[in-house]
Structure formats: C-alpha cells, structure tokens
Amino acid sequence: MRKTFARLRPLLFGLLLLPVLARAELVIEITGGAEAAIPIAVVPFAWDGDGELPEDMARVIDANLARSGQFEPLARSEFIETPARREDVRFPNWRALGIDNLVVGAVERDGNSYRVRYELLDVFTGQRQEGKNFRVADDALRTLAHVISDEIYEILLGRPGAFNSRIAYVTMEDRDGERRWRLLVADADGHEPQTILTSSEPLMSPAWSPDGEKLAYVSFEGRRSEVFVQNVGSGDRDKVASFEGINSAPAWSPDSRRLSITRSRGGQTDVYVLNLNSRETRQVTDSMSIDTEAVWMPDGRSLLFTSDRAGGPQIYRVNADGSGTRRISYEGNYNASPTVSPDGRHVAMVHRRSNGRFAIAVQDVDGENFRVLTPGGHDESPSFAPNGAMVLYATRADGRSVLGTVSLFGDARQTMSTAGERIREPAWSP
C-alpha cells in the first residue's frame, strides 16, 4: 500500500489507519503562480448554434495551460477584443498587453456533431503557428480542448503535454451507518469522474498499467489485503496476489508482464516481483527492515523502494534480480514513497522538512539536485504526469483532504477538492 512511511508500520501490522475519503466531482482551485511563465491569451471561441456554447473550450484550455506552471494566461476581464480568426486580430493591442501568443477559434453545430477550428498565433510576428479543423461528437468537446491544449504545449515548449490523460483515486463515504469505498477515474483536471469499483471494504494503492488500460490496486474484500488487476473499460478484474500475510503496493513493470508488490513472509516485509502469467513471485529484497513501495525504472532493469534499514525511511535502488542495492536519498532523515519520471531522470518523494512538515520533493535519480516543490504539511502519494512536468499528490488544504498538482517548472500549484469531502491515493495515467 502506497502510504507515507510514518504510517507504514501500523498500516502493515494493523491495517486500520484508513483515511476518510470523498465521492463528488473534483473542483479545481489554482493556488499558486509561475515565475517566468509564457504570457498567452485564450480568446473565448465563437459559437454558431442555438442556445449557449455547450462547452467553454477556451476556458478549459486556459486552465490547462495555467496549471502546467509554464504559461500565464491573461484574465478575460483584460481582453480588449475577442477575435475568432487571425484576420480579425489587431496585434498591436495584444502586444500592448504583453502577450506573446494568442489562441482564437470557433465552434459550429453540424447535425449531431460539432465543427471546431482553432489557431495559435504569434503576437509579435502576426503569423499563424498552428491552425486546425476538427469534427467531433456531441460529448467530445472537452476532450478536444485537452487535445488542443497538448498541441499548444508541445508547439511552444517542444515536449508533449499531458492534459489529455487521466487520474485514478480512491474515495470513501459513510452513509446510513455504512462505509463505502470507490475507485474512480477522471480527466487529468478532475472532471468527468467515473466509478470503476465500489466496495464495502477498503480499496487503496491504484497503479496504472503502461498502456493505460488497466489498474492494479489493493482490496480488502476478502477481509485481508489482496492485489487485483482490473480493466478500466470493461470492468473485468482478476485477483493476482492473495498470499498469506500482507499483499500491497503494486507497481507495473514497463513490459506489463510483472508487478512489484510488498509481501510479508517469515517475519519480514520485502519487495517481490510477481509474474502475471505464472503467478509466481521472486523475492527482490531481503532485510529485517520494512522494504516497500517499489516502483520500476523505465528500462525495467532496476527498482526504487522505501526502506528504514538505515534507521529512518530513505529511498534505495536495487537491480531487478535483487543485486546492487544502494541508497539514493540523503537529504534529511525522512524520504519515502518514490515515483519515477517517465524519462527515468527524476524521482519525486515525500520529504519531511526541518519544521516537521511533509512536502513533495524531487531529485535526480543519481541523488543530485534535490529540491522541495511544495510548502508542505500533510503531502503524500506523489505521481508523475506522463510528460514528467508535473506531480500529482494527496494533501490537506483548509482542513480538507484534497488532491494537488505541482509543476516542476516555476511555482504553479493547484488543488482539486470535493466540496469539503476528502480524497486520497492519486495515480496519474500514462
């Protein structure tokens, strides 16, 4: 189970300290700004159809870019004009507002679908950097806004965006004297949540398969911890680890053929590799300490894990065959819950600061360039975005348990909450 290590011992041996979680759609709140961000303006798309525009695509794009920490969108209240195409733009007006790039577009109803056009414009040259036309189904406007956001991000920054991706998380509610856990999947911005499993027993530690089609997770439906794999689309699921003792903290290998899991056996808690075809396990670590929370390096040749073998939780690296264990975190006396960036260059973790607050930190996988990303408090369960530019994590804000994201660039942060209810265990899809 992927938990802050301070809670790990009672969780491993008592399995009772479970957080209270939520059930409503996530609400976005941008809580920080970015330094040296690119000034951009996303003009409301013109609408040709009856009634109101069914989805404010420009607002979705605006929020996505702001959340990345690398763009500073202009507030709509400061717009001098609202052009729908390049020919209508008076570029000196936007240059006077300090805008580098401008996004304009239009949406047109066409039978049972929509025609959408957008242009990305360079304000200083007046030239079109990108311009595309789309035709999408009734319910696909928001998804298309994420696609356009990814295109803008890649054109201007030279690397892929991660807006058209998904997150998984766990919620819990008490209703009529009964407690219910749900495993949900939502868009990366928290919208369009879908419940993929409901249980009267705890669910935790969701982990995406490399193809984004399956989730591995821990369930207590059998009155003890077991690991399941479930197809997100079909709902088909399979119990893959139900060994005596603890079965927890699943993480997929890059080839999708194996899971790393934590097992308790013979009085020890160690990292094992589970072959999903044969269901056989192979022990990777062998220590009287607690070794847990293993995640794979992208090349599949080694894993990172948390261990208290040095007296306090720290991050270690081990070859997949169990050889060559070495410590990689040294900043402070508490570093746990590693997550590796998709390119294998960075590892994010939960770090206890000198003031005792738990924050999200990041460093190079070789141990260099350590830095703290969040102010800290009760931050836990970090998960990298598929482009490696942001980290999703669980935290508390204004007395609420919420999900947060933080950019590795600048100082942009946001929280995603459920109107006062609490949520945990986030995982960002590939």
Image: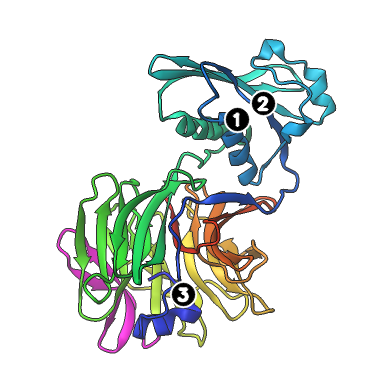
Which type of secondary structure does the marked residue at label 2 adopt? loop
Amino acid type shown at disc 1:
Ala
Which residue is labeled 1 in the image? 58
For the point 35% across and 85% down, the residue is: 13
Q: CA distance from mark 3 to mark 2?
A: 52 Å
First in sequence: mark 2 vs mark 1 = 2
Q: Which residues are magenta?
A: 262-289
Instruction: Tell me if residue 285 is in the magenta stretch.
Output: yes
Give whichever of 145, 325 is nearer the camera.
Answer: 145
Q: CA distance from mark 3 to mark 1?
A: 48 Å
Which residue is labeled 2 in the image? 43
Where residue 216 sits, quadrant-wise, is bottom left
- List the single residue furthest toward the left: 278
Amino acid type shown at disc 2:
Val
Evaluate if marks 2 and 1 touch, with contact meaning CB atoms under 8 Å apart: yes
Which type of secondary structure does the marked residue at label 3 adopt? strand
Q: Position of residue 371 (x, y in %)?
A: 65, 64
Which residue is labeled 3 in the image? 326
